[in-house]
Image (cartoon, grey):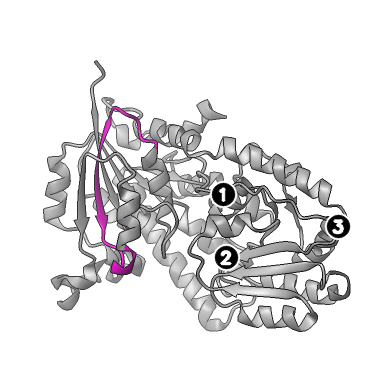
Amino acid sequence: MTDRKSVAVLLGWPPTRDNIGWPTALPWYLLSVAPADVDIHLFYFRHEEKHRERWMADQRLLRLASITELEPYCTRWEHWLGTSNTASRQGFPIQMDWFPVRRKTVKLIQACRPDVVWIYPHWLSRWAAELEAERIVVTGPDCAVLHCERSIQHGGVLTTREIEKQHADLASYKVLEQFLAGTGAAVHVVGQADADRFNELAGRPQATFTVHPHFSYVARSECRRDGERLRVIMSGDPSAVYIGDHGARIVASLVNDAATLGERIAFTLTGRNWDDLAVKLVDAGYSVRTEAWVEDYPATLAAHDVALCPYAVGVGTKGKVLQAMATGLLTIGSRLAFENVQGTAQRDFIQYNEPEEVAHMLCEIVADRSRSEGVAQSGASLVRDFHSPQWTGDAFWSFALSHLGRQNAKTENCNAMEGHR
């Protein structure tokens, strides 16, 4: 009979099938495929009460041995006494003050006698230094230093104040990741470049990359006939550093080609801060719908033909790209958009070198629907395989549960993907 393993999971938010406000979905999908011989003891900081029904429903779909809900710092005495910001005073990112280490909770976690403690995200890294287990795993999910470095280099035109903030963020994340390296925890990220940069900072192979799962999707089945508008969706926040100036440059190229495309494309822009760009498209003659919040994102995706993913900055694997491809949409994006997408090649999506190329690409798609359908279906098939929760979960749990019973397990590194390529 196989010995059961105990895993304590400490999360900054309750795990959910879709990201709700924060990156809450990654741990849900990995927990959903945890091995049957593992007892999961879940500890998480409570989210906003308006989301409780959603996270409780998703939680019931997981196989959990125990659940402990932690109060967020802002409802507790440490916030009112001003003692919650000790991390930021020491040079850490201010987000680490949201998740203060509580001795009572540390004792509850240790009472589970965990073989492994899994912590997510890296803003809870101070907990790693206080907990004991054969193996402690901290999921980034990315290398924050690399993200800040890319933001400074590729984030577009920034004001002096924004530049100062970027450099301040970089300094604080160096403090965080150097501290994390010193804890001896095994570090897990969802990008190869992220693992390489963290290991460079740590001076040893401490971080491992495993691929990101795609989220739940509704398979797109309706194909538009020639003459019908091509339905194109862009999601995110165009004012955020992730998109930089790519959104504005794509819209400018579309305005220039409005005489050709204006009556042939209908846009949906989901997320906040699209209003200015939407007005420019409408004035040029395009059909545009904006939605700040989409209740059923998988169904919304499935009602479209093309997903635009204009990421100027970012690290790790982009969940929106995976979900769009798994849905069966033809996906157009930057080089970074397709970073770490496994099993695919450029025949399975369309990659632009400069954002201004997007309007011409859409002209070609409108002119030849059958070719674009083939590209989309090829990408969907591969992403559904190589980024399925089961496939990616097998890789993650192989990594998380490795080296148990060996000396110095927390400082060893296992490239879990080697057996899954």
- Amino acid type of the residue tagged 3 in the rendering: Glu
Q: Secondary structure at mark 1?
A: loop
Name the residue carrying label 3.
364
Give me the residue at 84% from left, 63% from top: 360
Name the residue carrying label 1.
218
In this view, the mark in front (3 or 2): 3
User: Mark 2, residues whose alpha carbon is within 10 Å: few (<14), some, or many (≥20)?
Assistant: many
Q: Secondary structure at mark 2?
A: loop
- Amino acid type of the residue tagged 1 in the rendering: Val
Name the residue carrying label 2.
242
Can you say which quadrant of the picture contains the C terminus? top right
Looking at the image, which is closer to me, 163 or 354?
Answer: 354
Q: Is residue 418 visible?
A: yes
Q: Does label 1 or label 3 sit earlier along the sequence?
A: 1
- Amino acid type of the residue tagged 2 in the rendering: Tyr
In this view, the mark in front (1 or 3): 1
Q: Position of residue 380 (x, y in %)?
A: 65, 43
Give me the residue at 83% from left, 69% from top: 261
Please state the extent of the stretch shown in magenta in the rendering: 33-51
Q: Is residue 46 magenta?
A: yes
User: Mark 3, residues whose alpha carbon is within 10 Å: few (<14), some, or many (≥20)?
Assistant: few
Q: Is residue 190 magenta?
A: no
Q: Position of residue 299 (x, y in %)?
A: 56, 56
Q: CA distance from mark 2 to mark 1?
A: 26 Å
Looking at the image, residue 45 sits to the left or right of residue 181; the answer is left
Looking at the image, which is closer to me, 93 or 17?
Answer: 17
Q: Is residue 333 visible?
A: no
Q: Does label 3 or label 2 sit earlier along the sequence?
A: 2
